[in-house]
Amino acid sequence: MRKKSDIIERELEFVQNDNNSLNDKMKVEERNDEFNEIMSMMERENEKSEKIYEYFVGEHIKISQFIRDRINAISQVNVRELNSTWFINSKDLESQKKNFKYLLNVHNLPIAYNALLNYIGQSNAVQEKFQSEIEFLNEQFEVIKISEQQRRNIFLEKYGGFIPSLLVDLKESIPDLSLRTAN
């Protein structure tokens, strides 16, 4: 009688440990889902920042060329003559307003460019943090796998000879689980 009660107690302990392991696996899966959502968001934000950067570079080139062209034009023409003879129709005026809009804000371009560089640096730091978290989770997966393999080996040593393999095939290897970032 005493041996049966010891076996039952060991089996109950095994089932409780198995439930704890399942809870740990569920927590890891939840963190993985959260991580995937954050990674997706970061990829979208990274694409946006790349587009913004390309836009600013293009606008910088346009503004620089525009300023050079205007300075060359002004330096070749007497400013007084230009003031007395210059006639601008409405289409030219709208075009000039659009072009000068950039010139009015050219002083903000260095600030915006520096802010963009800071943002890109911060995005890179977040991506490094994600990579660190992935490595941590992968280590945790390996610990869980090793723990389960040890528990399985102990179980097979103790009870494997008594249980037909048709009921439970515990000799199969435990699957590998790892995370990686998509590039």
Image (spheres, helix red, strand yellow):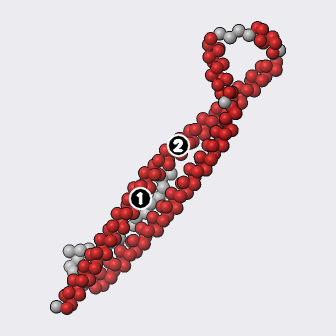
User: Which x, y percent locates residue 107?
Assistant: 70, 33
Tell me if mark 2 has few (under 14), some (14-19) or many (20+) residues whose alpha carbon lies within 10 angstroms of its own.
Answer: few
What secondary structure is marked by label 1?
helix
- How far across and down, in percent of the image, does residue 141 sit? 42, 67
Disc on the earlier residue, 2 or 1: 1
Residue 79 in which image quadrant: top right
Say which of 151 and 94 sits in front: 94
Question: Quadrant location of the N terminus?
Answer: bottom left
Q: Which residue is mark 2?
A: 47
What's under tag 1, amino acid-wise? Asn
Q: Three-letter amino acid code at disc 2?
A: Glu
Q: Is residue 160 visible?
A: no
Q: Is residue 99 visible?
A: yes
Quote the CA–CA distance across marks 2 and 1. 22 Å
- Residue 32, which numbered label? 1
Image: 120 above or below 89: below
- Whether residue 114 sits left or right of residue 157 in the image: it is right
* Residue appearing at x 21%, y 83% in the figure: 8
Q: Residues within 10 Å of mark 1 (few under 14, many from 20)?
A: some
Identify which residue is drawn at 78% across, 12% down.
82
